[in-house]
Image: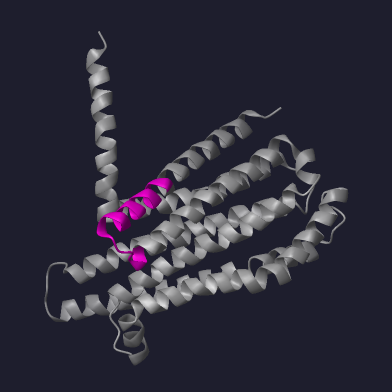
Amino acid sequence: MLSIVEGLLIFVAASESVLGILGNGFIGVVSCIDCVKSKKTSIVSIILTGLASSRFCLIWIIITDAYVRVFFPDIYLSGNLIQYIAHLWIIMNQSSVWFATSLSIFYFLKIANYSHCIFLWLKGHINRVLLLFMGCLLISWLFAFPSIAKPIINNIMKNRSTTWLITMHKSEYLANQILLNIGVILVFALCLIICFLLITSLWRHNRKMRLNATGFRDPSTEAHIKAMKILVSFIILFILYFVGTAIQISVGTIPENKLLLIVGITTRLLYPWGHSLILILGNRKLKQDSLRVLKPLKCWENEKFLRIP
């Protein structure tokens, strides 16, 4: 039986899942429709579609994994279910972080102001840079996944099928998990560097504006601030996602704790739906389309309210 706290946390996690599925589905559909209408595919549309699709699948994987682990732990430990879930999670987790970092690179190259020759070259070849970066994701799947992930997962599965990882040394288990996520950690470190460079560019731009005695915000400053909000929100939410993942990993090294497991699941789900919501609010096109979708629902609700005697 679940306690009241566990039930509330499951309700919160379910609400996050619904919001994440709707939000990411909306971004993916709008991006695809824009490509069809314009009859050409932009690099931003590819990134947004890939990001929304990977997060849509990631949420379903987290939900499936959580549901089986909480309500049917015996089924989770038997058979190959854990291996299939782990394989899918690695692919979608890497894809989500790589596409989000690609979006951060796009904002950085479009908005930041640097005079270094390398930055100017990257800025002039932004489409090639982003396509190359996203191509590295496929290369990481081809090389890292079969050689590192599969033996590690098999090792984890072998130990889990016996004594729920209690007999497995914590250091070995944690080392395996770090190897599984090393690519994600490196890409996230790149995102931190991009955020720092964007902050530096914003500081230099504001100092230049003060020297010119300009008393209002110009479009460049507004673009800097908007990009900073999206980048900082991504970093904060991804740290929470990493904390939630760490909590779930820790459950494998200590005796079963269902409450701790549910806390980790709820924390993990903040990232895929929260950042997508911020992207919708921060993108003028997505925001307008979302208001256009919600407007008939609001009118229907008002009409229904007026009909009530």
Q: Residue furthest bottom?
A: 117
| Image-quadrant location for residue 127 | bottom left
| Residue 43 in view here | yes
Could you say which is closer to the camera, residue 236 or residue 19? 19
Instruction: Count all numbered tags in the image, as a single digit.
Output: 0
Magenta stretch: includes residue 28: yes
Q: Residue at x 25, y 32 (%)?
A: 296
Q: Main secondary structure of the magenta part?
A: helix
Quadrant location of the N terminus in the rendered image: top right
In the image, residue 256 above or below residue 48: above
Per the image, is 91 magenta? Answer: no
Q: Residue at x 22, y 65 (%)?
A: 222
Q: Nearer the viewer, residue 123 or 258?
A: 123
The x, y position of residue 281, in whole percent, is 31, 51
Q: In the figure, is residue 28 to the left or right of 1? A: left
Question: Where, quadrant-wise, is the C terminus in this rendering?
Answer: top left
Range of residues picked out in magenta: 25-44
Does 201 appear above or below 46? below
| Residue found at x 47% / y 53% | 53
